[in-house]
Amino acid sequence: MRLFNFDLIPALLLFSICLIAPACSSSQQLTDNSVFKKLKAAHPDVAHEKALDKFLQQLETTIEAHAWDQLFTLCDKAHFRSQYLIGIQPPQYLAEIMGIHQKDNKINPSNHPVNYENLNTIKELSYTETTWDAVTGWVVVKGLLSLTTEKELEFTTYITVKEGAYYLIGAVG
C-alpha cells in the first residue's frame, strides 16, 4: 500500500512555484475598490486586497494544473457535503462550481456525466470581472476557460468568506 502518490510530484511542484512566484499567473488585480469596501463592511477582520488576490491566483493555478483534489480544498466543505449527499458526483460538482455545467455552457455537451477527463481539457483560465452580490454577500468572479478543444466556456464562480477565509460556493440542488 502506497501512502503517497509520487505521480503528483510534478503538479505539486508547479503549484508551489506558482504560489511563490505570482508572475507565473496571468491574473491581475481585477477587483475594484467597491468590492473591497463591501467585503470590508461585511468582514472587517480580513485584509481583503491581499487575501482575495492571493485566493484568485491560487484558484487559477489549481484549475490550470488540473489539481482537482486541491480545488476541493478551496470549496466550502458544508456545501460540497450537501451536494454529494444528494448524488452530485465530485467531477460534476467542480464543473458546477466553475459554472461550466449549465444548459448552453457545458464542458461535457453530451448527456453523459461530467468526468475528470472532461475537466482535464481545461487549458487556461482568464478572469474578466469581479463583482459583489448584495443578496448573497458573495463575491462573483467571471472569466473565460480555454479548452484544449479550442472551445471557450464562460467561467463563473462564487466566493464566500467564513472565519476569515475564502471558499468557493454554489447553489444547492
Image (cartoon, rainbow, N blue to C red):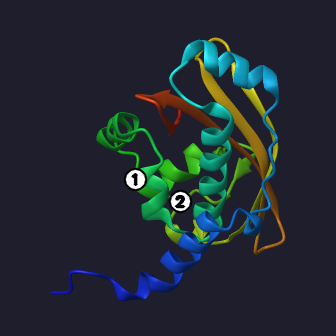
Observer able to see residue 100: no
Q: Which residue is mark 2?
A: 114
Q: At which x and y percent is residue 30?
A: 82, 41
Q: At which x and y percent is residue 103?
A: 69, 42
Nearest the eye: 27 or 21? 21
Q: Residue at x 78, y 35 (%)?
A: 31
Q: Amino acid at mark 1?
A: Gln
Q: Quadrant of residue 111?
A: bottom right
On screen, residue 94 versus residue 28, left or right, reads left
Nearest the eye: 76 or 27? 27
Above or below for 55 versus 14:
above
Q: Which residue is mark 1?
A: 89
Upstream in sequence: badge 2 or badge 1:
1
Q: Residue at x 81, y 51 (%)?
A: 28
SS at circle 2:
loop
Q: Residue at x 48, y 48 (%)?
A: 74
Q: Residues within 10 Å of mark 2 (few under 14, many from 20)?
A: many
Q: Residue at x 53, y 60 (%)?
A: 114
Q: Are marks 2 and 1 in contact (CB under 8 Å)?
A: yes
Label 2 and label 1: CA atoms lie apart by 8 Å
Name, please, the residue furthest toward the left.
1
Q: Amino acid at mark 2?
A: Val
Observer able to see residue 114: yes
